[in-house]
Image (cartoon, coloured by chain):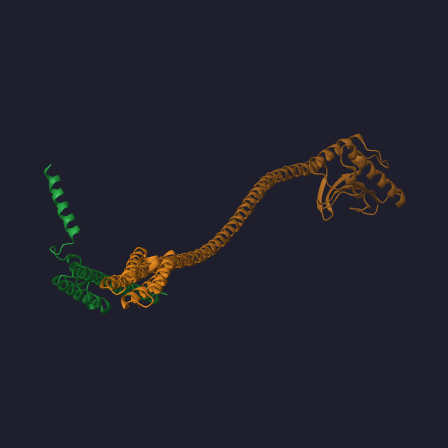
Amino acid sequence: MKTKQILSLVTLVALFVGCATVAPNELINARSAYQVASEGPAGQLAPAELHKAHEALVLAEQSFLKEPNSSKTKDLAYVAQRKSEQAVALGAIAADKASKDKAEAGFREKQAEIVKQTKQDLSDSEKRIAEAQAELDKQAAVKESKDKADADFQKQQAEIAQAKQALSDSEKRTAEAQAELDKQAAVKASKEKADADFQKQQAEIKASKEKADADFQKQQAEIVQGKQDLSDSEKRTADALAALAAIAAVKEEERGLVVTLSGSVLFRSAKSTLLSSAQVKLDQVAKALLAVRARNLIVEGHTDSQGSESYNQGLSQRRADAVRDYLVQKGYPADRIQTRGKGEGSPIADNASPEGRANNRRVEIVIERELQKPNQ
Amino acid sequence: MRHISKIGILVAVVATAIASGCASTPLRTEASTSGIRAAEEAGAAQVPQASLHLQLAKEELELAKGLAAKGEKENAASMLLRAETDAELAVTLSRGDAEKSEAQAAMERVRQLRQDNP
């Protein structure tokens, strides 16, 4: 601003001093050129040149003061103008250079930004691609695992079906086996039962056979014995009969075997006491009778017709009893001997003759047939 | 010893020349001619303002030579100064034009880049 002041001062002085002198065009141009230059950006962008321009103008002004119209003044003014223009031009250059630099910087910046953005986009792209790929991979994995799960499921289902089938078969086989076992068990049971029954039967058969054999043997023995007994009995009977026949009259009648003993042999006349000789005979009879199986005897006493019927009845009864008593005494079972007093009711001979009467006076021992039970 | 004397001679000659402001010394046109050459090489002919000042520089150089030939050494020297400054301005204007073009191109490039890549 000092420069401006000086300039203004110089101009003013110049005006006053050379008031009649008009500055040459070159100087006027130089001044205005300097004004333009100093008002513009040259002050900041080309200060050195502007300063040079100012110095040149000062020289021109000084020359103008000294030699207002000289060529030197004009030349100096001309040069001062050019120097101002130079400063302006240099300022413009500097401004343009700054613009250029700024534009280039902006360009580079934008480029870098673009590169960065592109890289970012690329990176994002790659990232998206990677994500998409990961997603695809994931889906593929999901699908794979799903497929695998499906396959596993199918396999499981098949296994389950198989297992069910196997189970069913197994159950069936088990049932069959069980049925078989049951059957066999039943068979076995029935077989065992049959065996047992058989055994039992066999045992029973054996037992009954043995029993039968035993019975048979026993029977045989009995038979033999019986035969023997019979034989013995018959023998004895025969012997007894023979003995009896030897002793007394023996006769086969319908009521049994009748052993007739004469009364005179047994008793004195009209007595019911046995003679001792009669005892001998009766011993023999008893012995003969006892030799065989005991049979029912009916001892009947008979008289002849002499005397009263009641007397004879009684006598005959007493005599029968006496005989009986003696037999019983000799051991004959009492319950097998009955007595009857027949009196004169059953003669066997004619009572008219003494022989007849003698025959009627008798005791008959009826040996009943064997089917009779002992008298009660 | 010897170069001191050589320098001494040189200084003496120059001092004498300056002191006398002699008419015998030739016109120092190197600055302006090289300036003009530089302007031409900078392509001032293609830049209107620059070509103007290039032309002016050439004319002034010739005028200066004419003045020198007429013996108006001071005027010739001043005219040479004109030529130098015009040539210098021509160079600067050429550079400025180029710089402006470059700046515009750079700005266009960045504008385009920004437009293409919002």
Q: Quadrant of residue A343?
A: top right
The residue closer to the viewer here, A183 or A295, is A183
Quarter containing the N terminus of chain A: bottom left
Query: In the image as oriented, which residue stretches furthest toward the top?
Result: A276
Q: Nearer the viewer, residue A105 or A140?
A: A105
* Quarter assignment of residue A108: bottom left
- Is residue A308 visible in the rendered structure shown here? no
Query: Where is residue A109 drawn, in percent x and y?
Result: 34, 58
Q: Is residue A223 above or below residue B17?
A: above
Residue sitting nearer the eye, A272 or A202:
A202
Residue A7 appearing in the image: yes
Q: Position of residue B75 (x, y in %)?
A: 19, 61
As displayed, is residue A309 above or below residue A36? above
Instruction: State left or right for residue A147 relative to residue B90.
Output: right
- Name the tint of chain B in the rendering: green
Residue A197 versus residue A174: which sits nearer the camera?
A174
